[in-house]
Image (cartoon, rainbow, N blue to C red):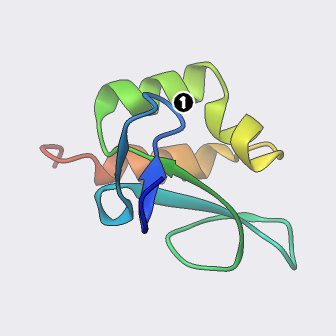
Amino acid sequence: MELNHRRCVSCRTLRPKQFFWRVIRDHSSGKVRLDQGMGRSAYLCPQTNCLQAARKKNRLGRALKTPVPEDIYQTLWQRLPGLP
């Protein structure tokens, strides 16, 4: 894997990490957060089909080894490009 490249947990596309959303399970509290923090991370393409598959098949939860709260998915839906 190239330096600073990450793989989407949904579609498995390899790209530079700035093209992805970062979802983190914080190492100190165990809470799932977006964008910043230290801990176990999963990366997701900012696309409708990747977000749908990640939610339906629990790909973020499996990658982070913890349940992902519904509000995280709601925040990601609001971030999708082209949505008001």
Residue 39 lies in quadrant = bottom right
- Where residue 14 sits in the image (x, y, percent)? 38, 43
Along the line of sight, the residue nearer the viewer: 52 or 38: 38
Residue 22 drawn above or below residue 10: below
Extreme residue toward the left, this view: 82
Indicate left or right for 22 with 80 as reference.
Answer: right
User: Local crowd at mark 1 within 10 Å, few (<14), some, or many (≥20)?
Assistant: many
- Where residue 78 sits in the image (x, y, percent)? 33, 50
* Residue depicted at x 85% and y 66%: 30
Indicate left or right for 53 with 45 as reference.
Answer: right
Number of disc labels: 1
User: Which residue type carries mark 1?
Assistant: Ala
- Where residue 20 sits in the image (x, y, percent)? 37, 55
**Residue position marked by numbered label 1 in the rendering:** 54
Residue 18 drawn above or below residue 60: below
- Element assignment for label 1: helix
Indicate left or right for 54 with 4 as reference.
Answer: right
* Residue depicted at x 31% and y 45%: 46
Residue 65 lies in quadrant = top right
Along the line of sight, the residue nearer the viewer: 23 or 6: 6
